[in-house]
């Protein structure tokens, strides 16, 4: 099958969408399919286009057998609603203008959100090429921005919801990443028969247990430290400031260090808080390349998966939980709903209330004091992901659904 996969984010950008799309695409190529990814110039999350792509209108590449068509876009840091919206819209327009003549024959087109603006480009191209349109829903836009208080104008919200429903109604297949997302769409009147769930997961051959990388530990001055890590976006949704508050409470525990890896809208203020409070037990690093992430997980004794206390998050499942479990690292998660249920089934995590620094401290101290229980959680998590969330198997299931609307 000849597949076009459209998303604004793709490797080497460190993001959940790029990980999902690149890993599914690579697996499909290994299974004998042809995959073309339509994407932008790499710039996420700091808004600076990588040197080798800077100043170019288009770039054609082959990465792991995947044909990658990159298009110009207005690059801006992952902060500021207006500038980010302009960036999303610029990619939507450039995708249509710059991709159609470069795109070879295809049998199907998948458009992955975020953002749903790019999905309109995907719908347009699919209609021009007369192939089925698959809308992959990774985030509930615009609902998440309404919940976070970013969008408040009733008329604008209504317009965006109408656009969202237009995409759903025109999709030949809708792919969600959680059961809860699927349920919400059905509640809004979308036909259940055209909605499937393909979970996020982990490539268990890449994300696997192993000893700590000694050179990396020494580079970060983490020798003889119990390492508590958060690796991911430092945005409005995550509430990383709760981790900083916990670090302040534990500042006298000289054998416990915190490692924060990533970037996002809140990183600057978080960094300033760490400086203001003189927290020597917290280390902040920029986003790391995808191939280094397993090493950062493995130097951790426990990983934190935080989300803010927002009702919509009961339907979200942070994709990083699968990678962490696959690496055999126990988790402390401030999650609710479907994510909580998955982690409870895995027996690999301590679940705490969102945005509770006190509960986070208690969980960290328990992890520190209970090495044997931590080891059991690590083994259980690895086994659970291998059995249920191996991305190579998920890719094959995905392909079976794609075949059903092409044949």
Image (cartoon, helix red, strand yellow):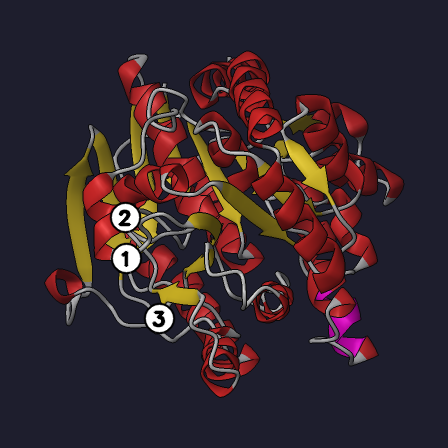
Foreground of the two, 68 or 379: 379
For the point 34% across and 20% down, which residue is it?
Answer: 205
CA separation in Å, label 2 and label 1: 5 Å
Write the start and end of the magenta stretch as one range. Answer: 155-160
Please state if 42 lies on the left or on the right of 92 as rendered. left
**Majority secondary structure of magenta residues:** helix
Residue farthest bottom in this picture: 276
* Rendered view: 165 above or below 200: below
**What secondary structure is found at the residue carrying circle 3?**
loop
Q: How far apart are marks 1 and 3 (CA)?
A: 22 Å
Mark 2 vs mark 3: in front: 2
Q: Is residue 372 above or below residue 387?
A: below
Which label was assigned to residue 220?
A: 1
Foreground tag (1 vs 3): 1
Image mark for residue 129: none
| Residue receiving disc 3 | 46
- x, y percent for residue 73: 33, 68
Q: Which residue is drawn at 24% across and 47% down?
A: 216
């Amino acid at each position: 099958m000849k597949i076009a996969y459209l998303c604004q984010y793709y490797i080497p950008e460190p993001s959940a969408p790029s990980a999902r799309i690149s890993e599914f695409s690579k697996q499909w190529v290994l299974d004998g399919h042809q995959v073309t990814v339509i994407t932008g110039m790499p710039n996420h999350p700091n808004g600076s286009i990588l040197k080798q792509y800077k100043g170019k209108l288009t770039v054609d590449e082959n990465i792991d057998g995947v044909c990658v068509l990159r298009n110009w876009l207005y690059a801006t840091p992952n902060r500021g609603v207006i500038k980010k919206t302009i960036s999303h819209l610029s990619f939507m327009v450039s995708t249509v203008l710059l991709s159609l003549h470069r795109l070879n024959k295809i049998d199907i087109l998948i458009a992955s959100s975020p953002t749903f603006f790019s999905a309109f480009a995907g719908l347009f191209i699919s209609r021009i090429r007369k192939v089925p349109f698959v809308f992959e829903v990774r985030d509930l836009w615009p609902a998440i921005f309404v919940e976070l208080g970013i969008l408040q104008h009733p008329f604008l919200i209504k317009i965006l919801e109408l656009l969202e429903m237009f995409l759903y109604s025109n999709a030949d297949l809708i792919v969600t990443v959680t059961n809860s997302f699927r349920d919400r769409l059905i509640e809004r009147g979308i036909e259940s028969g055209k909605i499937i769930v393909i979970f996020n997961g982990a490539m268990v051959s890449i994300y696997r247990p192993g000893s700590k990388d000694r050179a990396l530990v020494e580079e970060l001055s983490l020798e003889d430290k119990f390492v508590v890590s958060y690796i991911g976006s430092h945005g409005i949704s995550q509430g990383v400031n709760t981790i900083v508050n916990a670090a302040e409470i534990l500042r006298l525990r000289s054998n416990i260090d915190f490692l924060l890896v990533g970037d996002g809208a809140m990183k600057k203020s978080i960094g300033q808080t760490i400086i203001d409070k003189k927290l020597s037990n917290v280390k902040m690093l920029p986003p790391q390349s995808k191939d280094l992430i397993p090493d950062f997980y493995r130097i951790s004794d426990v990983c934190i998966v935080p989300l803010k206390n927002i009702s919509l998050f009961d339907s979200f499942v942070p994709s990083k939980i699968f990678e962490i479990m696959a690496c055999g690292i126990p988790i402390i998660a401030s999650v609710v709903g479907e994510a909580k249920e998955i982690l409870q089934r895995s027996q690999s995590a301590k679940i705490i209330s969102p945005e509770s620094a006190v509960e986070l401290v208690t969980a960290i101290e328990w992890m520190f004091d209970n090495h044997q229980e931590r080891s059991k959680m690590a083994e259980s998590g690895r086994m659970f992901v291998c059995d249920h969330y191996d991305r190579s198997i998920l890719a094959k299931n995905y392909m079976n659904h794609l075949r059903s609307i092409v044949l």
